[in-house]
Amino acid sequence: MKNKLKVFRIIKNLTQEQLADKLNVSRQTVIAIESGKYLPSLGLAFKIATFFKVNIENIFIYNQQEE
């Protein structure tokens, strides 16, 4: 699953560390999500979308063909 987390983070002018602090996760988690190596839990995905005040689909792009 692809995502635009890095784009949204840069628009808000946040470092990975700052975003991690706001989401109560580690910086490594933010790095892993941005690089596509880690899929966040549904709860964390909603927390991220809520933080950026967008729908979850604006950040996380589901591609059925990748399965």
Image (tube, grey):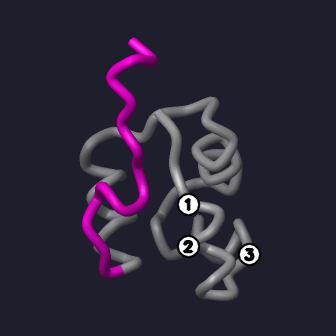
Among numbered discs 3 and 1, the one appearing first in the sequence: 1
Left or right, 3 with reference to 12: left
Quarter occupied by residue 4:
bottom right
Comparing labels 2 and 3, the label whose residue is closer to the camera: 2
**Marks 1,2: beta carbons within 8 A:** yes
User: What residue lies at 46% left-to-right and 67% top-to-bottom?
Assistant: 23
Q: Which of 35 and 29 is in front in this view?
A: 35
Question: Residue 8, percent across and down?
Answer: 55, 73
Quadrant of the snapshot with the C terminus: top left
- Pointer 3 local density, CA inside 10 Å: few below 14, some 14–19, many at least 20: some
Residue 62 at x, y = what percent?
36, 36
Task: Answer with mark 2 or mark 3, whichever residue precedes in sequence.
Answer: 2
Q: Distance between the residues labelled 3 and 1?
A: 12 Å
Residue type pointed to by label 1: Leu
The relative height of residue 39 versus residue 59 in the rendered view (above or below) is above
Res. 15 mark = 3
**Which corner quadrant of the image does residue 7 belong to?**
bottom right
- Element marked by disc 1: helix
- Residue 8, which numbered label? 2
Which residue lies most toward the top here?
A: 67
Q: Mark 1 highlights which residue? A: 5
Amino acid identity at mark 2: Phe
- 18 relative position to 22: left or right: right
The amino acid marked with disc number 3 is Thr
- Residue drawn at point x = 50 percent, y = 75 percent: 22
Q: Which segment is the magenta one?
A: 53-67
